[in-house]
């Protein structure tokens, strides 16, 4: 578990996590932008090397466990985009807000469990004491047929 003296980069090493290459935008926008002490990331999809790794509708084509893995992959992409923007993840103080939008059936109600695939990764890196607020909800569709998108806002240290 991360502590206040553990850096994000060292915690990734402890966990044996290698970040993917940062994703490229799918349109006319940038993947990250900072304002003051906040870093805003564009919505991250579960892609690897520009290709969707998991697709389908949660509750129909995908189980909660499969959707959690999609959320984890999207969160790793968020960290990769943050590293590219900041030069190092060690400037990340904490995750402030996490939003997870997911393509579900009308009957699906386990949104929180799916979002835990993202939240648990961030807790492993930043520690439980860092905490984050979260919003989750279901939607009809996503870009390129993705099952979910992860949106993150981080507090950052000044350069």
Image: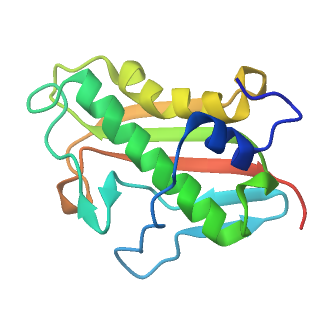
Q: Quadrant of residue 45?
A: bottom left
Q: Is residue 57 left or right of residue 157?
A: left
> Where is the C terminus found, in terms of image quarters?
bottom right
Q: Evaluate whether residue 101 shows in this view.
A: no
Relative image position of residue 82 (x, y in whole percent): 63, 61
Q: Evaluate whether residue 43 shows in this view.
A: yes
Which residue occupies 17% across, 55% down? 145
Query: Looking at this rendering, what residue extends furthest in the bottom direction?
Result: 28
Q: In the rendered view, tell whether residue 82 sits above or below residue 151.
A: below
Query: Looking at this rendering, what residue extends furthest in the left direction?
Result: 61
Relative image position of residue 155 (x, y in whole percent): 78, 49
Q: In the rendered view, tell whether residue 92 sits above or below residue 1.
A: below
Viewer-closest of 33 and 19: 19
Which residue occupies 72% across, 69% down? 87
Which residue occupies 71% across, 34% down? 126
Relative image position of residue 56 (x, y in whole percent): 13, 42
Q: Is residue 130 left or right of residue 119?
A: right
Q: Quadrant of residue 67?
A: top left
Which residue occupies 19% across, 31% down? 58
Q: Quadrant of residue 124?
A: top right
């Amino acid at each position: 578990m991360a502590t206040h003296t553990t850096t994000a980069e060292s915690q990734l090493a402890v966990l044996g996590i290698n970040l993917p290459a940062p994703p490229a935008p799918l349109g006319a926008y940038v993947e990250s932008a900072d304002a003051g002490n906040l870093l805003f990331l564009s919505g991250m999809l579960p892609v690897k090397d520009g290709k969707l790794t998991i697709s389908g509708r949660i509750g129909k084509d995908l189980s909660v466990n499969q959707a959690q893995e999609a959320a984890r992959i999207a969160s790793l992409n968020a960290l990769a985009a943050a590293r590219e923007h900041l030069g190092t993840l060690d400037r990340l103080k904490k995750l402030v807000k996490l939003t997870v939008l997911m393509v579900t059936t009308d009957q699906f109600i386990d949104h929180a469990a799916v979002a835990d695939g993202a939240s648990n990764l961030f807790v492993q890196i930043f520690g439980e004491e860092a905490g984050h607020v979260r919003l989750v909800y279901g939607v009809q569709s996503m870009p390129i047929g993705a099952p979910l998108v992860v949106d993150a806002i981080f507090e950052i240290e000044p350069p």
